């Protein structure tokens, strides 16, 4: 029997998500928050992504990392800053209660920025 941890989606649902390789070019802490402001190279453009990882990462630890980005997420204003995508990390809020801290998903090897993840 197949046991799911959450609701199942179809392959068509998954196909709506545009996952891309991004390279973190700039990273800084947003003063007075646990947020980091990242500038991420997606190949054809650079995007600003606001990530709630300031408790777990120093900005310099993310520089030049190849990360997984949801590129077609609708932009959102977070604490006055526009976030133009979302990076993926293992370890969600419910995991933190178990002592698991979030870890950014990274890409193995020299995959060019903007490469589609499928």
Image (cartoon, helix red, strand yellow):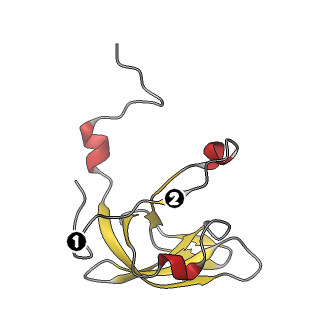
Percent x, y of residue 85: 44, 68
The answer to whether residue 100 is left or right of residue 6 is right
In the image, residue 41 sits, relative to residue 2, either above or below, namely: below
Does the image show residue 70?
no
Q: Quadrant of the N terminus?
A: top left
- Looking at this view, is 76 or 29 the one in front? 29
Q: Where in the figure is residue 60, as x and y percent of width and height?
A: 54, 82
User: Circle 2 is placed at which residue position?
Assistant: 103
Give the residue at the far top of this rendering. 1
Residue 107 % position (x, y): 31, 64
Tell me if residue 110 comes above or below residue 26 in the rendering: above
Given residues 14 and 28, the one toward you in this image is 28
Mark 2 Cα shell of 10 Å, populated few (<14), some (14-19), many (≥20)? some
Q: Is residue 88 above or below residue 21?
A: above
Report how many numbered discs are placed on residues in the image. Answer: 2
Q: Residue at x 31, y 77 (%)?
A: 42
12 sits to left or right of 33: left
Q: Classify residue 28 as left or right of residue 23.
A: right
Q: Residue at x 34, y 73 (%)?
A: 22
* Residue under the image location 66 percent in, 48 percent down: 96
Image disc number at residue 89: none
**Coordinates of residue 106 in the picture (x, y in percent):** 38, 64
| Mark 1 / mark 2, whichever is N-terminal | 2
Tell me, yes or no, if residue 104 can be seen here. Answer: yes
Q: Residue at x 35, y 18 (%)?
A: 2
Q: Secondary structure at mark 1?
A: loop
Q: To which residue does mark 1 refer?
A: 111
Q: Quadrant of residue 11?
A: top left
């Amino acid at each position: 029997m197949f046991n799911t941890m959450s609701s199942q989606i179809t392959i068509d649902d998954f196909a709506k998500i545009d996952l891309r390789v991004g390279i973190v070019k700039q990273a800084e802490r947003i003063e007075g928050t646990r947020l980091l402001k990242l500038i991420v190279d997606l190949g054809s453009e650079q995007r600003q992504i606001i990530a709630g990882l300031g408790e777990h990462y120093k900005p310099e630890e993310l520089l030049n990392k190849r990360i997984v980005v949801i590129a077609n997420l609708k932009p959102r204003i977070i604490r006055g800053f526009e976030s133009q995508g979302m990076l993926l990390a293992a370890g969600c809020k419910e995991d933190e209660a178990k002592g698991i801290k979030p870890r950014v998903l990274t890409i193995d090897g020299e995959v060019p920025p903007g490469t589609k993840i499928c």
